[in-house]
Image (cartoon, rainbow, N blue to C red):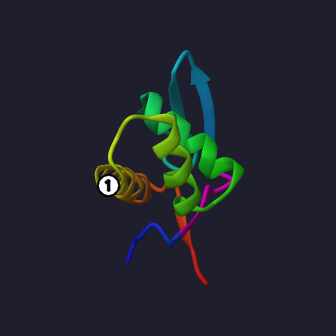
Amino acid sequence: MLTLASAIRIPTYVSFSVVGEDAFLLNTQTNKYYGLEQVGTRLWQLLNENNSLQSAHQILIKEYEIGPAELENDLLELVAHLMENGLVELVEA
């Protein structure tokens, strides 16, 4: 089950580039592109630096005006969507 305590890994077959405040991801296994807006782009950058959702949550709380519970729900929903499309993987403990 996906929680803030989950560790996430970005697979080597996923390419990432930023244009303005948005990011574009390419799953090279499926050749499909995906877009992230500002907050999603920032999450991706944080996951790329450190695979901790908990750490990303704490940093994003400080950077954006959003309640902790709402941000947690949004992050988990986004990460679940990224997982469904093969853009991130859970790291097994």
Of the 4 image quadrants, the one containing the C terminus is bottom right
Element type at marker 1?
helix
Image: 44 above or below 58? above
Q: Nearer the viewer, residue 33 or 22?
A: 22
Residue 71 is situated, as x and y percent measured from the top left of the image, at: 35, 49
Which residue is located at x 58 percent, y 58 percent?
Answer: 55
**Residue 87: image location, x then y, percent:** 51, 52
Residue at the location (62% across, 46% down)? 46
**Quarter of the figure with residue 51:** bottom right
Q: Which residues are magenta?
A: 7-13
Q: Decide if residue 63 is in sight here.
A: yes
Q: Residue at x 60, y 25 (%)?
A: 18
Q: Residues within 10 Å of mark 1 (few under 14, many from 20)?
A: few
Q: Amino acid at mark 1?
A: Glu
Q: Is residue 17 left or right of residue 34?
A: right
Residue 30 x, y percent position in the rendering: 48, 47
Residue 90 horizontal/vertical position (percent): 53, 70
Q: Which residue bears the numbered disc 1?
A: 77
